[in-house]
Amino acid sequence: MFHALATAVLALTTIVAPADEQRTAPGPSEVQVLAISVDGLNVSAIEQLGATGAPTFHRLLDEGAGTLNARTEVEQTVTLPNHTSMMTGRRIAAAKGGHGVTWDDDRPSMTVQKAAGHGVASVFSAVHADGGTTALYTTKEKFGLYERSWPKGIDTFTENENQKKLVSLARADLRDGAPTFTFLHVSLPDRYGHAYGGMSARYLGAVKRTDAQLGTLLDALDGSSVTVILTADHGFKTGATDHSARRDLENYRIPFLTWGAGVDRADLYDLNPAYRDPGTARPSYAGKQPVRNGDVANLAASLLGLPAVPGSDLDSDLSLTLTR
């Protein structure tokens, strides 16, 4: 959508390109970002359901910049560790400068700062410090970790296990005046994967329902100044009721899709030659990187004209771009 300059200040202009390839970029005061995480989304489900069964995911692919071959963090393929990376722009391992959140249950006494052993900034705290507004919507109670960790950074925190109602609440709030940065977490695919197995008929049904619910959100945002980033915390192995096997392709391969004003219609790797499509590999953090879900924090910061999230290491040079 916008180019991140070396000074981390974005020049927001109307981008000249063919009308069928891009939307008009909004002015500086109009920019908002909506990040969506679809918990446990296997990219094979998007391919198997096709444009008929998953029209929203395919709309994002067809109208925006994206890939179905992004990666989770290397250390784990579970929910809280990967979501914390999305919010902080850090890898997981605290000893390597990561955020240190390695558990995946609700621990009411814990914060990200306690896990890391020092202060940890997030995209929420960065936006708030710049005078912007933020919101976090989630279907899981354990996401209270983030409200505790950044109480002054998250202006609105909403938890509702009923995904349909949660999406409706988020849609209504976005229509009423989108916050500068919104994070929406939905988890039907993960729930049905644990109950019936990844890529089972019921799992695919959960992906299909999620697609339909998110479709109402995209319809509400069409033509607005909100840029959408959609990814997943992990995939879900076919037939398995657990996704913790971090060396399994179906667990570490995830989508990373972007859509909205100013976003080119293109493959994300084609737009970003500094990144490498990993094929079926599971690259370490050394060398040329694949697009990772942990890039969400700094991509959002870049789109909003902010510097990188303090202490982050994933896309900390703000190089990931959504336009030619």
Image (spheres, helix red, strand yellow):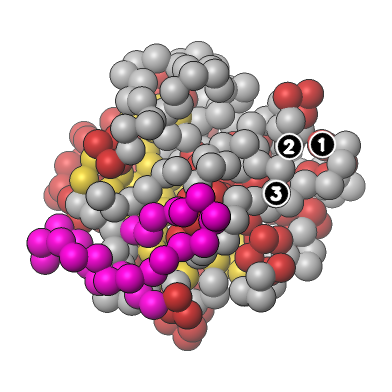
In this figure, which residue is indicated by the disc labeled 2?
99
Q: Which residues are magenta?
A: 1-27
For mark 1, does the 10 Å Cα neighbourhood hold few (<14), some (14 to 19), or many (20 or more) residues? Answer: some
Image location (x, y in percent) of residue 28: 45, 75
- Label 3 is placed on what type of residue? Pro
Residue 86, labelled with which disc?
none
Residue 116, labelled with which disc?
1
- CB-based contact (under 8 Å), mark 1 and mark 2: yes
The chief SS type of the magenta part is: loop
Q: Residue at x 29, y 52 (%)?
A: 323
Image location (x, y in percent) of residue 290: 42, 28
Image location (x, y in percent) of residue 293: 49, 39
| Snapshot quadrant of residue 17 | bottom left
- Label 2 is placed on what type of residue? His
Q: Residue at x 33, y 38 (%)?
A: 272
Q: CA distance from mark 1 to mark 2?
A: 5 Å
Q: Is residue 196 visible?
A: no
- Label 1 is placed on what type of residue? Ala
44 vs 70, nearest the viewer:
70
Q: Residue at x 53, y 42 (%)?
A: 317
**Which circle's residue, 1 or 2, is located before the other in the chain?**
2
The relative height of residue 310 versus residue 219 in the rendered view (above or below) is above
| Snapshot quadrant of residue 189 | top left
The N terminus: image quadrant = bottom left
The relative height of residue 128 versus residue 319 in the rendered view (above or below) is below
The relative height of residue 193 versus residue 107 in the rendered view (above or below) is above
Point out the frontmost of discs 1 and 3: 3
Left or right: residue 36 compared with residue 131? left
105 vs 87, nearest the viewer:
87
Q: Is residue 112 visible?
A: yes
Residue 310, labelled with which disc?
3
